[in-house]
Image (tube, rainbow, N blue to C red):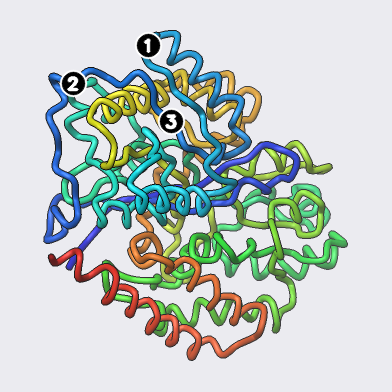
Amino acid sequence: MALPVNRRGFLALSGAGAGALALAACAGPDTSGGAAANAGASPDTDFSNVKPAASIEFWTNHPGQSQAVEQQIIDKFQKANPGITVNLVTAGANYEEIAQKFQTAQAAKSGLPGVVVLSDVWWFRYYVNGNIIPLDSLTKQLGVQLSDYRDSLVKDYQYGGKQWALPYGRSTPLFYYNKDHFKAAGLPDRAPKSWDEFAEWAPKLKAASGAQYAYMYPALAGYAGWTLQNNLWGWGSGWSTNWEITCDSPDAVTAMQWVQDTVYKDKWAGVSSKESADDFAAGIASATISSTGSLVGILKNAKFNVGVGFLPGGPKASTNVCPTGGAGLGIPSGITREQQLAAAMFIKFVGEPENTAAFSAATGYMPVRKSADMTAVLAKTPQIQTAIDQLAVTKVQDNARVFLPGADQEMAKSVAKIVTQQGDVKATMADLKKTLTGIYEKDVKPKLTA
């Protein structure tokens, strides 16, 4: 069964640690139909005769230390809509904790929010289980200009011909490099065009910079499945192709063998134990890949000139090797229509051009609207333009990562065996395929074909 045709989502940051909150992920697909069109899905509802509820809750983890700007947007919304109160609820410290709280409320069939932050690796299971509603009738009734949302970001939440969430805290990975280290090594002031090119640069960086590593792989939990799609795609493979698990293909094994060799054989790469953005900002490594959402924090904390660029290509693909990532906003199916309408009104307001620009300025996240005036933001942080430009060459994430429950954690475990335990790459990727196939056969396929 074929599936998506577009992109997904991730996180941001701007606080104490360069990447402490830029923790994230990536979002879903775009398809116009298929057997899954009604799998567990809530029917689209007519809201034309519904009055909005007087109060709803907004569950969030304040991505990118965004609590202050979230409250500012709520205050503006309540001033424009005096009959509706939005209560800001800290539902967790990260996407995983929000998901656990949301699942608990679903099981109890009570205490559900009006609006909930949904990460790229969680929203699809809520769709399959019928826990969220399609937004199509609401966006039409409220006049939401979906065409003004950035195409790749809004399509991340489309499935079965319907819209299941709208973009919120969104970003891509970026290639970050220490301009001072690159200059000392006599290298061009730019990101490498390919990983082969960077492999040629790495020994020069280690020799000239004094840094412990030329490159730092991101922490594996939350990042391995997301960022290593860049390598897998560049080598001509991926975690999956549609629903076919391909992580053990010869190209995938070659890609992951290359990754392992940079750590153990060539010895110019390290693996961050917590947050590569912080390691990079501290000068431990000359380059890393991290979320666009890490940009504000890195610029704040680094004591050197920071460069950013597109993700490098591989031997078989030189472009379209960058995934999007982050989170969107969805509406539970288990609340009243009145609450759902109020929630949709708030989601529309959050996504207004001036509000998404303010959110981007405060966090470093991607502006989700094309018409958002980014003049002031770019004047202060011009590097964000690189992330916006890279959107044109992003690629839809692999189904295996964003649609299989728990797959992201399984990918992280397997990558850990490869890059921190020097495990056999071919055997590890073969074992991962068995695990991912089992998840699909047990937890996804039956519901998609029901």
Position of residue 424 relative to residue 165, above or below, is below
2 or 3: tag closer to the N-terminus: 2
Of labels 2 and 1, earlier in sequence is: 2
Q: Quick check: marks 2 and 3 in contact, CB under 8 Å? A: no
Q: Residue 431 carries which label?
A: none
Relative image position of residue 19 (x, y in whole percent)? 67, 48
Q: Which residue is drawn at 37% across and 84% down?
A: 434
Residue placed at 31% from the left, 21% from the top?
53
Q: In this view, does 34 lie to the left or right of 149?
A: left
Element marked by disc 1: loop
Across and down, in percent, residue 5 comes to 26, 54
Q: Name the residue under label 3.
A: 57
Q: Which amino acid does label 1 sit on?
A: Asn
Q: Name the residue under label 2.
A: 50
Residues under labels 2 and 3: Cα distance? 19 Å
Mark 1 or mark 3: which comes first in sequence? 3
Residue nearer the viewer, 301 or 337: 337
| Front in this rendered view, residue 76 or 268 | 76
Q: In this view, does 56 lie to the left or right of 76?
A: left
Give the amino acid type for the residue marked by disc 3 in the picture.
Answer: Glu
In the picture, the disc for residue 81 is: 1
Measuring from the top left, give residue 188's x and y in whole percent: 69, 52
Eyeballing the image, is 404 above or below 422? above
Position of the C terminus by quadrant: bottom left
Q: Is residue 227 left or right of residue 303?
A: left
Image quadrant assignment for residue 21: top right
